[in-house]
Image (cartoon, rainbow, N blue to C red):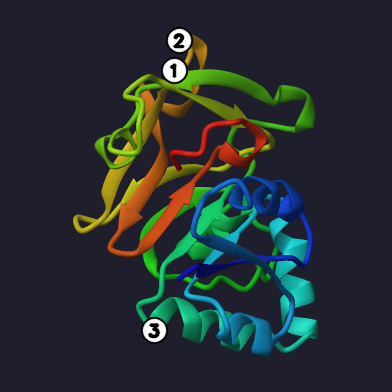
């Protein structure tokens, strides 16, 4: 029996997630734009993109309350980049009035922590135990594009990956590292884009 995994397809890199999901045996990938499509899936991926735009589209289409209910119902949700912001309980660096957040993860994120598009970069980070069990124990490629970072995480949130800042960044931010991947129960968030690599472990 195949498990149906949805990808929120309002904006952003949903096609890249769909492409990788279709490579995983036993998974049926579904683009989610409606309440009915959301109700048909066992888990959901909220892709990277422009978080404010996604929130506005979700509100306009009446999907935001359904997404909030889905996340609170104990169903698996994974947010990448903009999706991390969606799942955060609080976000810094927003415009006045902010954007609607789904919440669920006791984290505070900084939007565009790593700067503008021109500051996008790729690095390698140690693989956390939760993905080592899916084959390789090698470091993974982490692609950061206008990425957020977690400034603080609650005691029940598991830190999966951290990024070591450059010396000048460490001085500017008053810290040596920032959190870039977290998990709490069936909710997970990554500041980077695994869907832009060939690594299926995430």
First in residue order: circle 1 vs circle 3: 3
Q: Quadrant of residue 161?
A: top left
Element under disc 2: helix
Where residue 119 sits in the image (x, y, percent)?
71, 23
CA gap, disc 3 to disc 2?
42 Å
Quadrant housing the N terminus: bottom left
Residue toward you, 115 or 63: 63
Residue shown at 78% from the left, 85% from the top: 61
First in residue order: circle 3 vs circle 2: 3
- The mark found on residue 73 in the picture is 3
CA gap, disc 1 to disc 3?
41 Å
Residue picked out by circle 1: 171
Quadrant housing the C terminus: top left
Where residue 52 sits in the image (x, y, percent)?
73, 62
Which is more foreground, mark 1 or mark 3? 3
Q: Quadrant of residue 150?
A: top left
Q: Are marks 2 and 1 in contact (CB under 8 Å)?
A: yes
Residue toward you, 113 or 96: 113
Where residue 151 sits in the image (x, y, percent)?
41, 43
Where residue 70 sits in the image (x, y, percent)?
49, 81
Residue picked out by circle 2: 167
CA gap, disc 2 to disc 1?
6 Å
């Amino acid at each position: 029996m195949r498990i149906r995994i949805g990808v929120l397809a309002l904006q952003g890199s949903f096609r890249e997630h769909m492409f990788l999901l279709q490579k995983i045996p036993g998974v049926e990938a579904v683009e989610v734009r409606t309440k009915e499509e959301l109700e048909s899936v066992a888990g959901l991926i909220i892709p990277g993109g422009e978080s404010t735009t996604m929130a506005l589209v979700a509100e306009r289409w009446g999907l935001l309350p359904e997404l909030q209910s889905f996340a609170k119902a104990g169903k698996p949700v994974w947010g990448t980049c903009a999706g991390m912001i969606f799942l955060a309980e609080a976000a810094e660096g927003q415009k006045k009035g902010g954007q609607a957040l789904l919440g669920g993860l006791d984290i505070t994120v900084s939007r565009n922590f790593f700067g503008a598009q021109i500051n996008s970069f790729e690095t390698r980070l140690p693989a956390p135990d939760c993905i080592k069990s899916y084959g390789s124990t090698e470091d993974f490629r982490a692609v950061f594009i206008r990425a957020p970072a977690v400034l603080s995480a609650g005691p029940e949130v598991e830190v999966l990956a951290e990024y070591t800042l450059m010396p000048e960044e460490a001085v500017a931010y008053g810290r040596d590292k920032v959190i870039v991947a977290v998990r709490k129960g069936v909710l997970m968030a990554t500041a980077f884009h695994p869907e832009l690599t060939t690594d299926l472990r995430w």
